[in-house]
Image (cartoon, grey):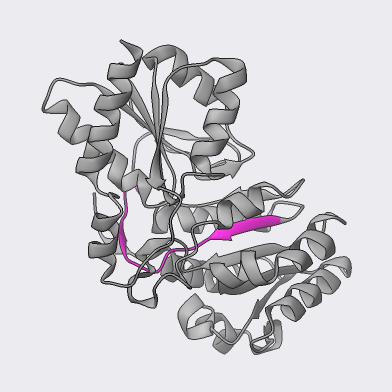
Amino acid sequence: MSDKKATRAAYGEALCELAAKYPQLVVLDADLSAATMTKSFAAAYPDRFFNCGIAEANMTAIAAGMASCGLKPFTNTFAVFAAGRAYEQVRNSIAYPHLNVVVVGSHGGVSVGEDGATHQMIEDLALMRSIPGMTVVNPCDANEMRLAVEALLNYDGPAYLRLGRSPVEVVTGGRDGYEFKLGKGVVLRDGSDVTIAATGLGVQLALGASDILASEGISAQVIDIHTIKPLDNELIIRAARDTGCIVTVEEHNVIGGLGGAVAELLSSEYPVPVIRHGVNDTFGRSGKASEVLEYYKLTAQDVAGSARAAIQKKS
């Protein structure tokens, strides 16, 4: 592992780095540019930045209009507003006509910390995944976020991109064999006893859990699922065949997100024990990010416990 950086910070940097290469890129924000990290883009490209105020539904509809004229809008606000407050506009104005807009939800998950339950969005992946034709992307670190932004600039269609508030370890940068492709998971570590498939900061937890398990003689495969929809079905099924059980890890409700997607796939294609490790269908609560993650058992030790339980289920 190397440096720590929040995925929202890497996102803001990527917008600025890629703006000259992609002149069709325009950025809209709902009066949160200092938090969503679009402020640097606003300063560098003021004619391509639009502060829509605290009016997320309007911002989403404006982006739809821009896309219909050939631009590539990225809309920005907190995930609770991007996926929640503006859901109808995302569904009907962007996804239904299959417009080329990236809906960006910052501050996803319980690691938002002190902002508390109202802003700790744990349903966004489920909401966006349920919309027909919507691509859903949740990068795990700064390197992967930069690659995801450029991939989405080259993607034609509606997409949802989740950002995190807290700094996380960079675990994909400089890794041999790592390649980012939308819709394709990445095997970060081989293993034979259990597969841990993770998204977002769950990837760092999965790698930590794999280390813990290795010290006990348990071989855990770790898969980075940065694209939750479309899911890499082939990779998930192959992992189920190879290891016989799967643990999913996400900073999200266990209902409807990565765990739901994996369970839906395997129940029909290759049934094996699946343990969904995430927030257990409850709202978040206020506190320091590290303490909140610990409270909701989003730690490497807890993920290792789920892996042991999954192995027992296949015995």
Q: Is residue 311 magenta?
A: no
User: Residue at the location (56% across, 80% down)?
Assistant: 41
Point 25% across, 48% down: residue:
299
Instruction: Tell me, yes or no, if residue 44 can be seen here.
Output: yes
Q: Can you name the residue that lies furthest to the top here?
A: 315
Q: Is residue 154 above or below residue 66?
A: above
Q: Quadrant of residue 188?
A: top left
Say which quadrant the C terminus sits in.
Answer: top left
Residue 8 position in % (x across, y down)? 45, 68
Q: Quadrant of residue 198?
A: top left
Q: Which one is nearer the viewer's eye here, 94 or 4?
A: 94
Q: Residue furthest left?
A: 215
> What is the magenta range?
159-173
Residue at image x 50%, y 45%? 226
Residue 255 lies, in percent from the top left, at: 52, 44
Total labels drawn:
0
Q: Is residue 163 magenta?
A: yes
Figure quadrant of residue 168: bottom left
Q: Is the magenta region chiefly helix, strand or loop? A: loop
**Residue 172 visible, this orientation:** no
Q: Is residue 117 above or below residue 265?
A: below
305 left or right of 49 in image: left
125 and 226: which is toward the camera: 125
- Please state if 251 lies on the left or on the right of 149 as rendered: left
**Whole-percent x, y for residue 138 in the image:** 51, 52
| x and y percentages locating residue 17 in the rendered image | 53, 69
